[in-house]
Amino acid sequence: MRGMQSKRVPSYIINKYQSFIRFILVGIVNTFNYYILYLLFMAVSIPYIFSHTVAFVISMIGSFYLNCYFTYKTKPTLKKFFQFPITYIVNYSVTTISLYVLVDLFMLNEFIAPLISAVIPIPFTYLVSRWVLTK
C-alpha cells in the first residue's frame, strides 16, 4: 500500500475547530439530557410545550457548566451565568417554533419532533456562547 495518502485530518484543522468539536459533543450530551427530561415530564402527563420549557431550562444550566469547563476551558462566573441565557433566547425561540410547527402543523410525533428541532439553532448558539464565555 505504498504511495497511498493517509486520510487523517491535519492537526491544524483539528486545532482550528477544536472548540467547535467540543461544543458539538457538549450539545450531544445536553440534547440527550434534555430529551430524557422531556420524556420524563411527558410520562407524567405534563403538556409537551411545558415539558419542553422545563427540560430546556434545566439542560441550559448543565450546558453552561459543560461549555465553561470543557468547551472553552474558562472559569464559570456569576456574570457569565447570567449572560449565558442570551445564547438560548434565539435557541429557545427557534426550537419552540419549530417544535410547534412539526407537531401541530406537520403532525410529526411529539416524541420525535424535539430531536429535529434541537439541530436547527446550533451554529448561532455556538457563536454567541463563544462570545459570552470567552470575552
Image: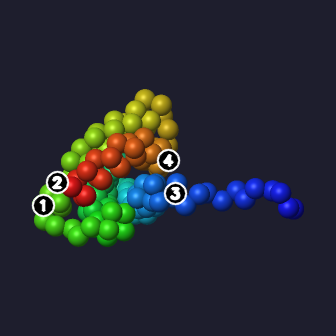
Alpha-carbon span between mark 2 and mark 3? 31 Å
Alpha-carbon span between mark 2 and mark 1? 6 Å
| Mark 2 in CB contact with mark 3 (< 8 angstroms) | no
Task: Tell me residue 89's x, y (percent).
Answer: 24, 44
Secondary structure of the residue carrying numbered label 4: loop
Secondary structure of the residue carrying numbered label 3: helix
- Packing grade of label 4 (10 A; few <14, some 14-19, many >=20) is few
Residue located 28% across and 47% down the image:
128
Task: Tell me residue 111's x, y (percent).
Answer: 47, 50
Amino acid carrying label 4: it is Ile
Q: Which residue is mark 3?
A: 12
Secondary structure of the residue carrying numbered label 2: helix
Q: Quadrant of the C terminus?
A: bottom left
Visible in this render: residue 49? no
Alpha-carbon span between mark 2 and mark 4? 30 Å
Q: Which residue is mark 4?
A: 112
Task: Tell me residue 8's x, y (percent).
Answer: 66, 59
| Mark 2 in CB contact with mark 1 (< 8 angstroms) | yes
Amino acid carrying label 3: it is Tyr
Residue located 70% across and 56% down the image:
7
Alpha-carbon span between mark 3 and mark 1? 33 Å
Nearest-to-viewer mark from 2 and 4: 2
Amino acid carrying label 2: it is Gln
Residue 65 to residue 55: above or below:
below
Q: How is the image coloured?
A: rainbow
Secondary structure of the residue carrying numbered label 1: helix
Q: Quadrant of the N terminus?
A: bottom right
Nearest-to-viewer mark from 1 and 4: 1
Residue located 46% across and 54% down the image:
17
Q: Earlier in the sequence, mark 4 or mark 3?
A: 3
Task: Tell me residue 10's x, y (percent).
Answer: 59, 57
- Packing grade of label 2 (10 A; few <14, some 14-19, many >=20) is some
